[in-house]
Amino acid sequence: MRLTYVAGDPESVPQNSPTLYKTDRGSWVVQGWVVTDPDALAALNLPEGETAVEIPDRMIPLFTQP
C-alpha cells in the first residue's frame, strides 16, 4: 500500500496529528487518537483486526482527493 499525505491537523501540537492519508487502493488511512472508552468500543462492536481512532470535526473538510 502506498500512502500519500493529504493533511495534518493544523491546530495540533507538536506534529500535526491527527493526519489523513490517501492510499493507492482507493481508500483512506486516518491517524488519530485511539478510542479507549469502553462504552464507545462496545457500541462500535469492532470485529477482530479492526480498531477505531478519533479525529476532530475540523478535519472533515480535509477529506479531498489530492
Image (cartoon, rainbow, N blue to C red):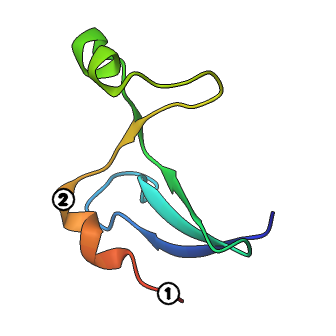
The percent coordinates of residue 28 (x first, y second) are 55, 64
Residue 1 position (above or below residue 39): below
Above or below 24: residue 64: below
Sequence-first disc among 2 and 1: 2
Q: Label 1 belongs to which residue?
A: 65
Furthest-left residue in view?
A: 57
Q: Mark 2 points at which residue?
A: 57
Circle 2/circle 1 CB separation < 8 Å: no
| Amino acid type for the residue under numbered disc 2 | Asp
- Rendered position, 37 above or below 50: above
On-image quarter of the C terminus? bottom right
Mark 2 closeness class: few <14, some 14–19, many ≥20 residues within 10 Å:
few
Front position in the image: 14 or 21: 21
**Number of callouts:** 2
Residue 51 lies left or right of residue 43; in this view the side is: right
Image quarter of the N terminus: bottom right
Tell me the SS state at disc 1. Answer: loop
Q: Position of residue 36 (x, y in %)?
A: 36, 18
Mark number for residue 1? none
Q: Residue at x 30, y 10 (%)?
A: 38
Task: State how far apart marks 2 and 1 are (Cα).
Answer: 18 Å
Q: On the picture, is 26 further left or further right than 37?
A: right
Farthest-out residue, right: 1
Q: Which residue is drawn at 41% across and 83% down?
A: 64
Q: Residue at x 18, y 59 (%)?
A: 57
List the single residue furthest toward the bottom.
66
Residue 55 x/y as whole percent: 31, 49
Identify which residue is drawn at 74% across, 75% down.
24
Name the amino acid, label 1: Gln
Q: Dot 2 lies on which element?
A: helix
